[in-house]
Structures are given as structure tokens and as C-alpha cells.
Image: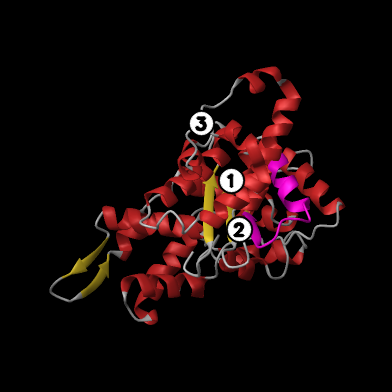
């Protein structure tokens, strides 16, 4: 957007009808253009592109995208009789086609478009169909689609997996970027930047935060916000710096989301490491590491078990 491009974003949610997400994102996009101070001629070329791509069928999108009608400066009455004649799959296919043509008409060489759709694991079939059309249409240029989804909620039979496989089978290269946990040093650098403190002063806090959140950035930010709300992190006027109560932060319980994530994360660990963690749980909140020596010798756990547990934040060394 800073480079004269366009940015459209939509987020699927269990509380929102999935078939409304893409239309809502487009409606917000055109509404922002309508509310801008740009003159009528600024977006004239886009109007021409939309008219050429969609034609008279653009009127069937006005109910779903009200701000599009204002943008097109179309004062004609919407003819719904044609929509009533088309039903079932035919209507769905036409809507997919219209959405695809509308989106493809927005960008140009001087004004590229980035479309971001979050939480695609909850997307509906029609939206996934639009994505398939957009990604496989050779006539679409200056367009980038970024899709985000939770890998643990999408199996091989999921609609999203099927759609992605269909796209790949047509020779389209999909770049997959797995966003995992951040390292301890990255967590420390983040907290240092947020609190405007040297790295060495933040390290005790960042170690606790990383251990409690597993390094998941969303949980890190949520925990920092809650610590601030509970005044376990505060700005000291006297010291002119941010302060924190490390002892109380250590005692703070994790949220259910973090517990769920950590449980799922443990379930994906190697079998020996899972067994080792179960043994540690039986030994209580603190124990002598030499107790695990027999288990290591019997090959019940791996040689690097303790180091891996500390690195993953499951265990903490004393001293």
C-alpha cells in the first residue's frame, strides 16, 4: 500500500459465516476507496478494468459488496430476476467466476494487489473455489495471495488440503512457510525492544516468558499484555525504566490456549522424549538429573534428552 499498491485482508472465524468473509473484505476495500479524498478520475482505470472483466454481471455482486456499486457509480436498479432463474451449483459457479474476475481486475502493473486470507482452515467451499480460480488463471497478473491456516487442524482429507493439491496438480508453485516458535534469543530481543532495556537486563524475564509460552509469538505478546494489565510489568517514574516482578511472573499460571498448544506440541515429540517427560512428571516439580541416568543407560530416553527439554522450555536447570 505504501508503494501505491492495494492490500485486501479477510479473516475466517467460527462465529462468522465463511461465505461472507471474502465479500466483506472486498466491501471494506471499496468502502475505503470511496471514503478517500481521491478524485473520481483517480480510480477510473480500475472501473474500466472491472467493467471489461465482469461486464453487466457486476450488478449481481452489489448485494454482497454494497460499496462496489458506489465505486462503480452505478445508479441502475439491480435485476434479481436472472439470479432467481439460476439455482444450486450453477449460481455458486457464477458467483465464483464473478468474484475471480472482480479481484483480477483490481491490480495493474503500477498498482499490484496483495490479498491476505487468515484462518483458511475454516474457509468455505466457494471461497476455496475462488482461490483455485485465481491461482490457476494465466490471465491474472500483478497479484499475490497470502493464505494462513493452522496446520494441526488440517488433515489430508480437509477441503483446504484438497484445494491446494488441485492447484499444485495444475503446475502452480505454492510456497509454504511454516511459522513455528521463536528462539530464546529472539524472545529476549523482542522484549528488549518493547521495554527499551538492554538485552542482559531482559534475559531473566525473557527466559520465563519463553518457557511459559513455548516461544509462540502470539502467546508471547498476549502474556506481555496480561503482565502489564496485572502490573507485574510497569514503568517506574523514579527509575525512568520498565520494571518487572520476576517472582510473581514465575508463579503466574498459563492460559488454556497455551496449555493446549504445549500439549499438542508434546504429542508430536519423538516417543523417547515423550516417555522421558512422563518420567520427569512422576519425579515432581524438581529433581536431581542423575536420577534419569539409569533411564538413559537403558536407552529408555535419548542421550540428549535433558538438553532438548531445556531447549524446548519443558525443563529448567537450577543454577
Q: Which residues are drawn in magenta?
A: 129-146
First in sequence, mark 3 or 2: give its number: 3
The mark closer to the camera, 3 or 1, is 3
Which residue, given by chain and number where applicable, does mark 3 sit on? 76
Which residue, given by chain and number where applicable, does mark 1 sit on? 119
Which residue, given by chain and number where applicable, does mark 2 sit on? 107
The answer for how far apart the CA atoms under marks 1 and 2 are is 24 Å
The answer for how far apart the CA atoms under marks 3 and 2 are is 26 Å
* Residue 46 drawn at (x, y percent): 56, 54
Of the pair 237 and 3, the residue shown nearer to us: 3
* Residue 300 drawn at (x, y percent): 75, 59
Residue 148: tell me if it is visible. Answer: no
> Quadrant location of residue 176?
bottom right
Other-residue count near label 2 (Cα within 10 Å), few / some / many at <14 / 14–19 / ≥20: many
Of the pair 40 and 151, the residue shown nearer to us: 40
Look at the image and name its color scheme. Answer: secondary structure
* Residue 169 drawn at (x, y percent): 87, 51
Q: Is residue 144 magenta?
A: yes
The mark closer to the camera, 1 or 2, is 2
Amino acid at each position: 500500500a505504501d508503494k501505491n499498491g492495494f492490500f485486501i485482508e479477510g479473516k475466517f472465524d467460527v462465529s462468522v459465516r465463511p461465505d461472507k468473509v471474502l465479500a466483506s473484505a472486498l466491501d471494506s476495500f471499496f468502502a475505503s476507496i470511496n471514503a478517500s479524498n481521491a478524485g473520481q478520475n483517480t480510480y477510473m482505470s480500475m472501473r474500466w478494468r472491472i467493467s471489461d472483466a465482469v461486464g453487466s454481471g457486476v450488478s449481481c455482486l452489489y448485494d454482497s459488496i454494497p460499496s462496489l456499486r458506489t465505486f462503480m457509480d452505478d445508479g441502475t436498479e439491480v435485476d434479481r430476476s436472472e439470479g432467481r432463474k439460476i439455482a444450486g451449483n450453477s449460481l455458486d459457479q457464477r458467483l465464483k467466476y464473478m468474484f475471480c474476475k472482480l479481484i483480477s481486475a483490481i491490480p495493474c502493473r503500477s498498482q499490484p494487489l496483495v490479498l491476505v486470507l487468515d484462518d483458511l482452515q475454516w474457509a468455505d467451499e466457494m471461497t476455496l473455489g475462488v482461490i483455485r480460480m485465481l491461482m490457476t488463471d494465466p490471465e491474472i497478473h500483478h497479484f499475490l495471495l497470502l493464505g494462513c491456516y493452522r496446520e494441526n487442524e488440517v488433515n489430508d482429507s480437509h477441503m483446504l488440503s484438497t484445494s491446494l493439491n488441485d492447484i499444485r496438480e495444475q503446475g502452480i508453485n505454492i510456497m509454504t512457510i511454516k511459522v513455528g516458535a521463536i528462539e530464546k534469543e529472539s524472545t529476549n530481543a523482542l522484549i528488549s525492544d518493547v521495554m527499551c532495556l538492554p538485552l542482559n537486563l531482559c534475559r531473566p524475564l525473557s527466559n520465563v516468558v519463553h518457557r511459559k509460552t513455548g516461544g509462540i509469538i502470539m502467546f508471547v505478546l498476549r502474556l506481555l499484555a496480561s503482565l502489564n494489565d496485572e502490573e507485574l510489568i510497569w514503568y517506574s517514574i523514579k527509575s525512568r525504566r520498565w520494571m518487572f516482578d520476576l517472582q510473581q511472573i514465575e508463579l503466574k499460571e498459563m492460559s488454556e490456549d497455551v496449555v493446549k498448544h504445549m500439549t499438542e506440541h508434546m504429542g508430536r515429540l519423538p516417543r523417547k522424549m515423550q516417555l522421558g517427560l512422563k518420567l520427569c512428571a512422576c519425579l515432581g516439580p524438581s529433581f536431581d538429573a542423575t536420577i534419569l541416568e539409569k533411564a538413559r543407560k537403558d536407552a529408555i530416553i535419548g542421550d540428549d534428552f535433558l538438553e532438548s527439554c531445556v531447549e524446548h522450555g519443558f525443563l529448567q536447570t537450577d543454577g
